[in-house]
Image: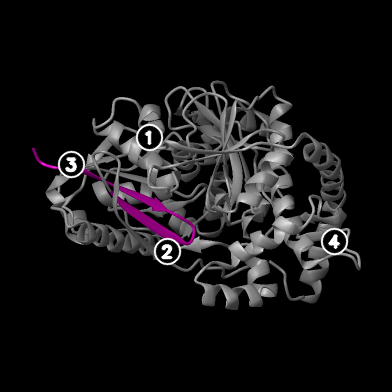
Amino acid sequence: MAHRYLITIDVGTSSTKTALWDEAGRTLAESSSAYPLRRPDPLWAEIDGTTWWAAVCATVRDVIAAGGIDPRDVAGIGVDGVSWTLIPVDHGGQPLAPAMIWLDRRAGEETAWLNALPDAARLVDLDANPLDAAYTTPKLLWLKAHRPDVFDAAYRFLDATGFIVGRFTGEFVCDTTQAYGYHFFDMRRDAWDPWAAERIGVPLEKMPRLCPSTEVVGAVTAKAAAETGLVAGIPVIAGCLDAASGALGAGVTRLGQTNEQGGQAGGMAVSLDRVVVEPRLIFSHHVVPGQYILQAGTVGGGSLGWFRDTLGQVESSVSALLGSSPFELFSQQVEVAPAGAHGLIFLPYMAGERTPLWSSVARGVFFGLSYTTTRADLLRAIMEGCAFAVYDNLQIAEEHGVSVAEYLGSGGATQSAVWCQIKADVYGRPFIVARRADGGEGGHSLGLYALTAFGVGLADDIGACVERLLPQRQVFEPSPERHAMYEDLFGVYRSVSRKALDDFERLDAVARKHKLAGQV
């Protein structure tokens, strides 16, 4: 019997990661290709779509070669991608302009116009998401106002996942987990809404067909096969939002389970069976049929990277000699610092903040510095502040009766045991890290593997497939005493963050007026 393999492709903000899997769910080869994020203006964030496709082609060729397989034995391909991305393409799938990704906030005026509409609340309720500049809707309006030639010439408006699927198959689709970026998407009916599209000013004929994530939407074309080293005819599923595949790969397969993604872009995703409209948070379909995910998105995960680059020269030098990571040395220091960091609180808004503040101008703050503050306190406050940022969102979710049955951690932050313990203590519930049998993480690739296997008929149940491949569970139990202390500190954190919002606006205005360094 011939071997059957699957290829998963995670199209991220700074790199594309591709993995080759065998039928049993073992990773045979992995490859990553990085690319630059273009920032021609402080509020812009864009990537050339052809750069994405080049990264896909290179990494697919890499894993085929490293795995030593016959491309004819590949049984399916699955793709996930970053959210809130707008790529206008022509009939052949060629991009007509750079992709505006989730970090792009140039559409401030268009967002203000949308929020001023008498029907604004109706649009928010329809899509179950806020009208914010990060979403795709304002980006469409910006394109219409500033690049009407591109807007009019566009055959389809695609997201990151749909763009790569289109390059593979020639078919233009939008899966239901990515559709939440558009405020003319009816979250309850899984359909484009003609009234909302007309009110916003978007021709529905330019939108791709909606479909579930696991649907086989087409097959690899001869052209795509020649570019990637594959063969024509391999089935390609619609794919999904990276946060959805990440949640699935972390073990979120049943209602109430929650994933916290600890990385450059952190946050949480809790599985629900009903639509919750909370404009301070993010809402989308889950990839598991019948489930949604209420999400939080934070940006503080990169704070330790900032510390490493700015103040961590010693750890960077020593870790190179020890063959370890600077982050391991940071964690060792945090372990000896007392919980609460001697009363130091960190607001991790180094690049603004998404949920629940939705502020482009928020900035990082150390609150409570004194002559007794140690370097270890700074590091511990960063870890605690990132946990507070997620807890802020969890508290809002609980206002809507959302309960967390099981809290699962994923991402690079789970490599730090002390950080995992901090999160358990802050959240006041067990924090669980589930890993594969080989000790590797779940995450996007594993979630995509399960989706693709189900879509092409190699798995009967998505959830069971994931759970089978995550047998190792490390549980961090919360301390009631530390949780009580963190509750008090969190009250200060939340108060300071809200009171500082007006001053963040004033600081941004001053920075722009005087062209001060550090303006984002």
**Picture quarter containing residue 494?**
top right
Q: Which mark is residue 506?
A: 4
Q: Which residues are magenta?
A: 1-20
> Percent x, y for residue 147?
50, 59
Q: Which mark is residue 48?
A: 2
Alpha carbon distance from label 2 to label 3: 33 Å
Mark 2 residue element? loop
Colour theme:
one colour
Mark 1 nearby-residue class (10 Å; few <14, some 14–19, many ≥20): many
Which of 89 and 28 lies nearest the eye of the viewer? 28
**Residue at the spot 48% in from the left edge and 50% down from the top edge:** 82
> Percent x, y for residue 45?
55, 62
> Percent x, y for residue 475?
58, 37
Which of 21 and 217 lies nearest the eye of the viewer? 21
Alpha carbon distance from label 3 to label 1: 21 Å
For the question of whether residue 118 can be seen, the reply is no
Whether residue 338 sits left or right of residue 276 in the image: it is right
Q: Which residue is mark 1?
A: 213
**Picture quarter containing residue 464?**
top left
Q: Which residue is mark 3?
A: 4
